Amino acid sequence: MKKTAFVLAAIILFVGCASATLTPLQRRVMESKELEGTYEDAFRSTMAILQDKQYIVSTSDHSGGIIIAKTALLPATKNWPALPVGAKEKLEISINLEKFTASIVKIRASILRYYFDLAGNPLHWWIKSLPPLVEEPQAYSDFYAEIQKEMFRRAQLNK
């Protein structure tokens, strides 16, 4: 029993030490992107991609460039050792779009991931090694690539 507890504690400690936190500047670079196209296409494309990814938009302000959305509880996509079997996750995203030029839109998205047990109780309060902020550059890169593709499709349809 003691050996099992020690191994579990070592795994939790290792996962906690392995997740290096990004500096604010590193986070801003990872979360930000310049998109080619109009502001209108960028806003509409972002809304469409969020819906494709099963997000429910709770707030959107076209003139202010703000979109806030979240998913329902879904099966956890990460297999962290500290997560109980059957854990669920909910993603929340906050997006800011800004018209930079007539053909460039700056976008910044912050994604949070929260974990829940089978009963729907939050797990982040006791799993300190799993920060809610998603710090996976590929997740942001893939998200922006999908938006850019959708913007291209819209631009082609508008010709």
Image: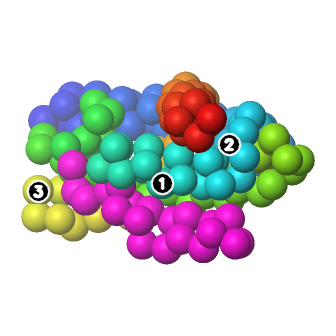
Q: Nearer the viewer, residue 14 or 68?
A: 68
Q: Main secondary structure of the magenta part?
A: strand
The number of numbered badges drawn on the structure is: 3
The residue to which callout 1 is attached is: 47
Q: Nearer the viewer, residue 73 or 45?
A: 45
Amino acid carrying mark 3 in the image: Leu
Secondary structure found at label 3: loop
Which one is earlier in the sequence, the residue at label 2 or at label 3? 2
Q: Mark 3 packing: few (<14 Cα in 10 Å), some, or many (20+)?
A: few
Q: Nearer the viewer, mark 2 or mark 3?
A: 2
Q: Which residues are magenta?
A: 55-74
Q: Where residue 36 appears, x then y in whole percent?
A: 74, 34
Mark 2 and mark 3: Cα distance apart in space = 31 Å
Q: Nearer the viewer, residue 62 or 140?
A: 62
The residue to which callout 3 is attached is: 118
Amino acid carrying mark 2 in the image: Glu
